[in-house]
């Protein structure tokens, strides 16, 4: 087999994999990872069950691949743009805004996927829960790191409780996600506002990324 033939097969495989995962994400976002079965996915994606098995292996591996793809999208939309900001406090505030924008825009019909699958698998030990937990722990560690960096840079007050602030921001997100899914726009906006206020209450000076209030006509 020539290099061109090998590359062509790999490209077709990548396209098939992406196509299947798009359908898997659409199912999982609304029904959870347990809503995904190889048979159902084959029917909805218009591919054979054998093709799915070749590309992903068993059902559990398919579910994990679906979760990882969603987390990749989340990272691209929320984390990376925030990480590119100049200062630690700018990064923290951008992360807050990006998360609420992501959920509000219904990028995923079921809202924050990490929150959803964490509830789905909280009492179900195994590979899937281990994978979810690794992302939860990594996200919390990153959030604490950004808060600590802002504190060390003199952007947050010296007495800022890193653990408490991180917990508050994640608690607001959990409440906001449920509010968004239940159509409670007022509570969603309140959670967003309180998240920023919670950070800014600890800020030494107004950060560059602080949004201007809209002019009153």
Image (spheres, rainbow, N blue to C red):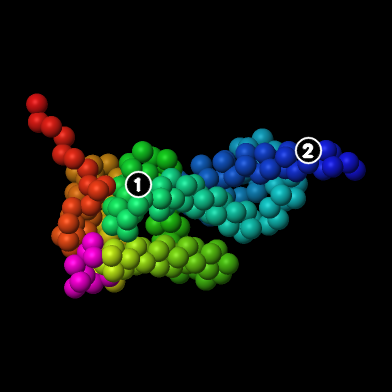
Residue 196 visible, this orientation: yes
Farthest residue toward the left? Answer: 217
Judge left or right: residue 34 versus residue 88: right
Q: CA distance from mark 1 to mark 2?
A: 37 Å
For mark 2, give the secondary structure.
helix
In magenta stretch: residue 156 = yes
The one nearer the camera, 20 or 134, is 134
- Which residue does the image show at 9% across and 26% down from the upper left? 217
Please give the name of the residue rendered at 88% of the width and 41% of the height, measured from the top-left corner.
Answer: 2
Percent from the top left, x then y, of residue 96? 30, 52
Residue 53, position as x, y percentages in the image: 72, 51
Is any part of residue 121 visible from this angle? no
| Residue 28 is inside the magenta segment | no
Residue at point 62%, 59% (across, down): 60
Locate residue 166, reporting x and y percent: 29, 65
Q: Quadrant of the N terminus?
A: top right
Q: Which mark is residue 109?
A: none
Q: Quadrant of residue 143?
A: bottom left
Q: Going by the picture, which residue comes out furthest to the right?
A: 1
Q: Residue at x 36, y 67 (%)?
A: 145
Query: As displayed, is residue 161 above or below residue 73?
Result: below
Q: Which mark is residue 98?
A: 1
Give the magenta part as a residue range.
154-162
In the picture, measured across the screen, residue 120 lies left or right of residue 97, that is right
Closer to the chain start, of discs 1 and 2, is 2
- Residue 204 vertical position relative to residue 193 in the rendered view, above or below: below
**Left or right: residue 125 compared with residue 171:** right
> For mark 2, what is the residue?
8
* Residue neighbourhood size for the residue with mark 2, other residues' Cα within 10 Å, grouped as few (<14), some (14–19), many (≥20): few
């Amino acid at each position: 087999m020539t290099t061109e033939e090998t590359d062509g097969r790999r490209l077709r495989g990548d396209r098939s994999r992406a196509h299947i995962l798009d359908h898997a994400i659409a199912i999982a976002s609304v029904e959870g990872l347990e809503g995904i079965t190889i048979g159902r996915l084959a029917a909805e994606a218009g591919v054979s069950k054998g093709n799915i098995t070749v590309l992903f292996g068993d059902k559990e591996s398919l579910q994990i691949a679906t979760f990882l793809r969603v987390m990749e999208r989340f990272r691209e939309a929320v984390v990376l743009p925030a990480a590119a900001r100049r200062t630690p406090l700018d990064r923290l505030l951008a992360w807050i805004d990006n998360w609420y924008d992501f959920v509000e825009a219904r990028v995923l019909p079921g809202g924050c996927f990490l929150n959803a699958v964490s509830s789905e698998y909280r009492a179900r030990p195994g590979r899937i829960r281990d994978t979810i937990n690794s992302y939860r722990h990594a996200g919390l560690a990153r959030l604490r790191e950004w808060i600590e960096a802002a504190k060390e840079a003199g952007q947050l007050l010296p007495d800022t409780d890193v653990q408490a602030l991180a917990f508050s921001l994640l608690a607001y997100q959990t409440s906001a996600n449920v509010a968004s899914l239940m159509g409670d726009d007022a509570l969603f906006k309140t959670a967003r506002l309180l998240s920023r206020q919670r950070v800014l209450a600890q800020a030494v000076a107004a950060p560059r990324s602080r949004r201007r209030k809209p002019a009153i006509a």
